[in-house]
Image (spheres, rainbow, N blue to C red):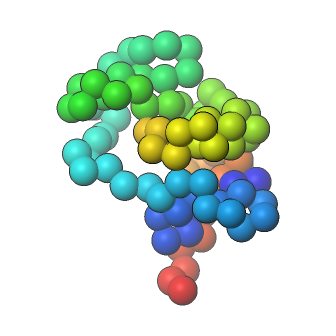
């Protein structure tokens, strides 16, 4: 399971895979159809990967290859454990 805490995604070993940050504050309405696994961002034209359509290992592999990859994360997706507490 991947964990999200303090805007960071970590793997099951606690290794930081990505810091979540978007300078454009993209919402669902800013995304247009792309590939089977991604949307295209209307604001910056980058692919935004839909984690609801990916397995955990695919997300880890993507972030290992490109830590700056953009992700669309559904808070109800069981792949993610979201921790709302502060350090």
Report the label total: 0
Left/right placement of residue 6 relative to residue 64 reads left
Q: Residue at x 70, y 47 (%)?
A: 79
Percent across and percent down for residue 34 are 42, 14
Q: Is residue 7 above or below residue 23?
A: below
Would you say residue 73 is visible in this rendering?
no
Percent across and percent down for residue 48 are 43, 31
Q: Residue at x 47, y 64 (%)?
A: 7
Location of the N terminus (image quadrant): bottom right
Q: Quadrant of residue 81?
A: bottom right
- The foreground one among 23 and 25 is 23
Q: Is residue 51 above or below residue 14?
A: above
Q: Is residue 9 above or below residue 41?
A: below
Q: Quadrant of residue 46?
A: top left
Percent across and percent down for residue 40 are 35, 22
Which residue reaches farthest front?
Answer: 65
Location of the C terminus (image quadrant): bottom right
Left/right placement of residue 5 relative to residue 1 reads left
């Amino acid at each position: 399971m991947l964990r999200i805490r303090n805007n960071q995604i970590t793997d099951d070993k606690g290794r930081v895979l990505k810091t979540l940050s978007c300078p454009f504050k993209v919402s669902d309405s800013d995304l247009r159809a792309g590939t089977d696994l991604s949307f295209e961002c209307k604001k910056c034209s980058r692919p935004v990967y839909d984690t609801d359509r990916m397995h955990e290992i695919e997300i880890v592999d993507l972030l290992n290859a490109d830590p700056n990859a953009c992700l669309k994360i559904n808070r109800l997706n069981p792949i993610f454990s979201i921790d709302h507490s502060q350090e």
